[in-house]
Image (spheres, grey):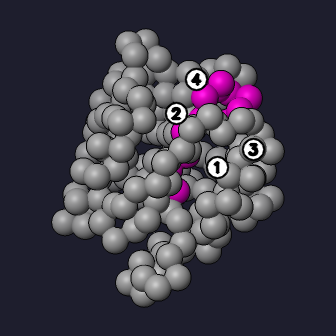
Amino acid sequence: VIEKVSKQKEEVVIKKDSLVVKEGEKILEVGCGTGLFSDLFGDDYVGIDFFDRFVKKAREKNPEVKFEVMDATKMNFEGGSFDKVLLFCFLHHMDDSQFDKVMKKVLDISKKVYVMELVPQKYNFIARVLYWLDRGYNIREFSVLKDKLEEYGKVTRYHMFRSFIYKMVMVEV
């Protein structure tokens, strides 16, 4: 139920942020998990995740979509392989060194990167417990996230929104 409610809100934000995919655009989602958003991005979507059990579940849910088990810090795609790369609720799992490796690679394989991330909330105890359960040990304040992203490219737009009990931000680099 939580996943369904959360996805509905995030889907609205994705569409509002012009992430509607044009025919023929190649999309890579890094850290796709169980493929929650894969149905939003058309036929030329590839999802990767480090955990084989997540990729197995994604393939069961969407057998027609291409999912691969892959370490995001060691992606083996050639430069310019994708039109857009999606990092949805993923970077909070990366320490600064891993963050740097991932950003260098995704900006090599694509010109546009879309980041959707959790934003810490001091007084939201339930969200903090869920962050911990999610193993999001590197949730960054928005100003820190924005500064880190701008080390790799210009942040062209962003906006904050609420999804279920989380506060989130969508950023285009």
Residue at left 72%, top 22%? 79
Which badge, 3 or 2, comes first in the chain's sequence? 2
161 relative to 60 in the view: left or right: right
Residue at left 52%, top 82%? 122
Q: Mark 2 points at which residue?
A: 28
Query: Which residues are drawn in magenta?
Result: 106-117
Q: Mark 3 points at which residue?
A: 150
Which callout, 1 or 3, points to the residue nearer the camera?
3
Give the alpha-carbon distance from disc 4 to disc 2, as whole Å: 7 Å
Residue 71: horizontal and vertical position, in percent? 64, 49
Which badge, 4 or 2, comes first in the chain's sequence? 2
Which badge, 1 or 3, comes first in the chain's sequence? 1
Q: Mark 4 points at which residue?
A: 82
Badge 4 marks a residue whose secondary structure is: loop
Vertical side of 127 occupied by 105: above or below:
above
Residue 44: horizontal and vertical position, in percent? 42, 22
Vertical side of 146 occupied by 112: above or below:
above
Which badge, 4 or 3, comes first in the chain's sequence? 4
Which callout, 1 or 4, points to the residue nearer the camera?
4
Quarter of the image with the C terminus is top right
Give the alpha-carbon distance from disc 4 to disc 3, as whole Å: 20 Å
